Image (cartoon, rainbow, N blue to C red):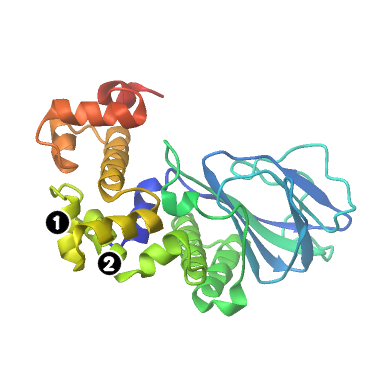
Amino acid sequence: MDVLSDVLSVLRHGRPRSALVTWHAPWAQQFAPVPGAVGFRVIVRGNCVLVPAGAAPLRLGAGDVVLLPHGRGHVLADSPATPPAAHLCDPATADPPGSRAVDDATEPSTVTLCGAYELAPPGHHPLLRDLPDVIRLNAGGHPELKAAVDLLGTELTLPKPGADAAVPALLDLLLLYALRAWLDVPDTGWAAALRDPAVAAALHAVHQDPAHPWTVASLAMLTGLSRAPFARRFSELVGQPPVRYLTWWRMTIAARMLRESDAALDVIAGAVGYQSQFAFAVAFKRQHGVAPGRYRKSP
């Protein structure tokens, strides 16, 4: 499995939420922060302004897709001068108050597709954590992203049999295509790491077989670099040394297995590269702060 697919499959949690809503000027809605989630806004029709907390307003038009990777609070409005409604909206659980159904007879000033993706604890993968607070993309410049937006809008406007299965799948595609479009642009951080042949090869190997007894030397040999240059390049682009990243990813996988399966601890330990259940428990507690058994029982 490639790195981006693996990251999304392990960190995505629960079902994404979405709503296709219309706005009639003047309007302004304040959205509450959603810790541990990636919010999104798609402008289907019209224009609006997104005002991130503590940042300058961002003017948006039809076709714009905005990702809020860190779930920060913000205001969406027809104008920065319009005062927001008193009621906070949780984008992960509810439609904005005052919004209207898309079949309303009154011509709306703006139509938006709003929603959020829940991420599994204990935090984001560094690929997501390194993203800026607000990512703006225009779907018109990314055919795959535009196709996902169009299909999602159709399913939400005119739901047909199978919509309950189609919408979550399309939301997953929307997130994937948006991240792919963003990672195609920057030359720093994880975007650069995934384009660097040596670092990308090492990341792919770790995600392909996290249980393998990888060492800095074996990963360096795989990439064709000597040990020291490889470790330095990996640390610069990924943000942590190779073995530390390997351990962190193994414990992230283990946490998901503990939450979502009833596999025995020795089975989970083996799946993430530990022959000893004791060594696995020590590594798990070091990262998560609790023993594996207690983590499994926690709410």
Image point (49%, 49%), residue name:
129
**Residue carrying label 1:** 218
Instruction: Compare residues 244 and 147 and report the one nearer the observer.
Output: 244
Farthest left residue? 275
Q: Is residue 174 above or below residue 69?
A: below
> Amino acid type of disc 1?
Ser
User: Looking at the figure, which quarter contains the C terminus?
Assistant: top left
- For this view, does 56 lie left or right of residue 151? right
Q: Amino acid at mark 2?
A: Ala
Residue 166 seen in the figure = no
Crowding near the residue tagged with mark 2, few <14, some 14–19, many ≥20 C-alpha atoms within 10 Å: many
Residue labelled with disc 2: 198
| Residue 172: image location, x then y, percent | 46, 58
Apparent side of residue 96 relative to residue 165 in the rendered image (left or right): right
Q: Nearer the viewer, residue 113 or 118?
A: 118
Q: Element type at marker 1?
A: helix
- Spatial distance from mark 2 to mark 1, Cα to Cα? 13 Å
